[in-house]
Image (spheres, helix red, strand yellow):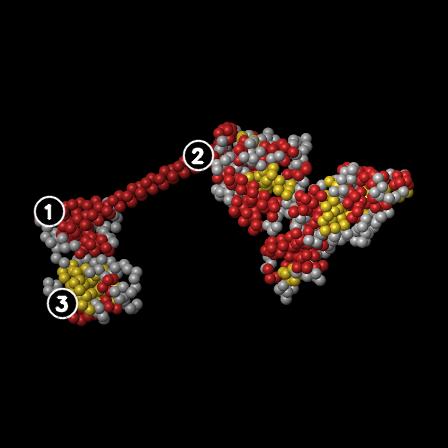
Amino acid sequence: MQTINFDTLPAEIPVVSEADSFLFPFMISPIFLSDERSKKGVEYAMDMGLPIIVVPHKNSSEEDEEYIDSIYKAGVIGSIMRKTSLPDGRVKILFQGVKRAKISRITEETPTVKATVEVIESSLIGEVKSKALYEVLKERVKELSKYNQSMPNDLLTTISGEEDIDRLIDLISSTLKLDLDKAYSIYIEESSEERIYALLEAIESQIELGKLQKDLKTKVHSKMAQHNKEYFLKEQLKQIQKELGVDTQRDEEIEEYRKKLEAKKPFMAEDAVKEVDKQLKRLQRMHPDSSDANTLQTYIEWVLEIPFGKLSKKRLNIGDVEKQLDKDHFSLKKPKERVVEYFSVKELMELRGIKESEGRGVILCFVGPPGVGKTSLANSIASAMKRELVRVALGGLEDVNELRGHRRTYVGAMPGRIVQGIIDAGEMNPVVVLDEIDKVGRSNRGDPTSAMLEILDPEQNKEFRDYYLNFNLDLSKVMFIATANDVSTIPAPLRDRMEFISVSSYTPQEKYEIAKKYLIPQELKKHGLKNSELSISKKALEMIIQNYTREAGVRNLRRRIADIARKTAKSLLINSDVNRVSLSVKNIKEFLEKSVFEIDRVPKKPKIGVVYGLAWTSVGGDVLKTEVIKIAGKGAFQITGKLGEVMKESARISHSVTKRLFDNGYLKSDIEEVYKKFDLHIHIPDGATPKDGPSAGITMTTAIASVLSDKPVRGDTAMTGEISLHGDVMPIGGLREKIIAAHRAGIEYVLIPEKNYERDLKDIPDEVKKDLNIIAVSRIEQVLEHMFTVE
């Protein structure tokens, strides 16, 4: 190795960049080089006997950055003591630093980086100030050593014997592990005094950091020691209590109950907090093995499950309600309009800050046959309002305690269904569907409808008292929606609190659209089938609706589609070569076993004593054949077909009206035949099915008149209407269902009361009206005039 004179530097020397650390003049350090320009520079320096300047490499992520911008402009001038080539292609050199220097300019970059450099000369400090600064520096380094465990043990000894202030600064800087920018700012400073101040600032920063870390470690250690101590003492206490036969788990459970109570207390009424707190104190005093303790603990667990304070935050928006109803339901135009109107009022009251109890505060009740979508409408409302849906089935409910809860004195007592529903929903303002509210019964265990009054009335349900809870619960935020099949069976006080929305039967065309748009896609998804794997032709779907279901809604239609989907799934699995099943009229019997004709198509041949009436049933409309025959007798008549009292009275009225028509000469016959020679037998077939109501009045009158006058009546006509003793045709209910039934049966003419024609005809679907001739009648003579006109 050649001797290098560092007092007189060459015009340019090689530049080597070091990426890992910042080197100082007094250091002898190994440097590993992988950069080709640095390796070439080392070779050039050794060949020419030149020193090199080692500069730190900046931490930069820009790959295309210029070399001059990627390095710091100051470094250490020194000599290469040894060079070794490594197997991985890198070069290792042993470098001895001598002086601080800075790069004036880069003179060449390839293949070797060369630069003109200047030695950094430090300014002098006065002896007194130098000594003072030295003592301060030594004292702060000593202080730092208390917190920085990585500082060398012999550093204080080393700096005590060092007289060169710049060497001292470099020595301390190298042990502080400063970041490159901070180290560079101290390193490049020419004023030794400023270098000391900057170094002292860095030392103070590290002392503060060390103090903070030590304080945190002390606190963590103290906390862990305390935790370990508590754990040890608790384990000892458990062991002692175990030896004494005392169980501590119950104390932990009671403490947990108290925490839950404290969290819910701001949202609970004062009487509720007092009741729960009182029962908690009782539980704490009781022996854990007593039966009362178990009952009390169950009570507390039930109460603390009530979601006090938890509410759905979404504001009511009728736009969302309308959109959800249209998305989930086809047709049902009037019910959907009524629902939107109802919620429009609620939203307006909410926007204007009017409490619901100050308004009408009624409850929605969807009324209609099974399967027409009553519960589904409630589901849509809950979805639109982003609230949980709770369904409470009231069918056959007789025990009032099912709603109000059982008193805790009874074995197996629990809260009522309403409270349980709120707990299941997890919020205090769910949508609660009271299903089949018309089927709530009364028994010796109380009257549930009376409890329903308190639950549904906004004036009262703010303080609904559940017998099990034994405190008042606010139900005013709950949205109650009821469903019913028959409004007449609901008690009048309960009806008064409800807004009834009628959900009527579907026409065949509506059923077809519902099946196509909703039922088939839903059932395919439920049965794991793709849309391409099952196709049902239009004719086949219409046949399923016409011949394989008997309902006003679409529930059985859904079942039939599910039957088809199951058989399709089986066919796809058994026959590997089958990847698609097509259902048509020809192969429908392979999928559905037997047809259930809802309404037989009536024979249109005129007959004596056979008239078709229209009736409303719980599953929609129906066509009832009314048969009358005369037999030798004395003018009496009998009625069969399991008829109710109202229908029997209607038959007697019909008999009297017919006699009057003979009396006044409108009908011609031997009066003796009408009164003395013949008995009449009136029969409504399907005798096992109960039938009642006044709307068959004109039907029975026509049939009796036909038999007694020996005139055949038209077979292409059906009718509905109540008859008065004076022969007036009076209005009836359920006209929509009855007209749809006539359409299904292939009837051509329908006779209806004139008042129904004026007020209810707009409710009849257009596709039904265009296929029927609907005739309004107000007198029995008009009915007979049409029926006796045999074509």
Image coordinates for residue 178, horizontal then vertical, percent:
24, 53
Q: Is residue 285 rendered to the left or right of residue 777?
A: left
Instruction: Identify which residue is drawn at 23% across, 71% down.
Output: 111
Q: Residue at 22% of width from left, 46% of height from top?
A: 204
**Residue type beneath disc 2:** Leu
Q: Nearer the viewer, mark 3 or mark 1?
A: 3
Q: Earlier in the sequence, mark 3 or mark 2?
A: 3
Residue 676 is situated, as x and y percent measured from the top left of the image, at 90, 39
Separation of marks 3 and 1 at Cα, in angstroms:
37 Å
- Disc 3 residue type (three-letter): Ala
Disc with the residue nearer the chain's start (3 vs 1): 3
Left or right of 227? Residue 191 is: left
Residue type pointed to by label 1: Lys
User: Which residue position holds label 1?
Assistant: 129
Q: Is residue 684 visible?
A: no
What is the secondary structure assignment of the residue under circle 1?
A: helix
Q: Between disc 1 and disc 2, whose residue precedes?
A: 1
Taking depth in this image into account, of 106 and 293 the one nearest to the observer is 106
Which quarter of the rendered picture does the N terminus lie within? bottom left
Regarding mark 3 in the picture, which secondary structure is present there? loop
Give yes or no for contact between labels 3 and 2 (Cβ–Cβ under 8 Å): no
Closer to the camera, 712 or 162? Answer: 712
Camera-side residue of 400 and 372: 372
Residue with the mark numbered 2: 237
Look at mark 3 in the image and give the residue it sits on: 11
**Callout 2: SS:** helix
Q: Nearest the camera: 267 or 132?
A: 267
Q: How far separated are the C-alphas under marks 3 and 2?
A: 84 Å
Figure quadrant of residue 106: bottom left
Query: Is residue 488 left or right of 684 when viewed as pictured?
Result: left
Give me the C-alpha separation between circle 1 and circle 2: 66 Å
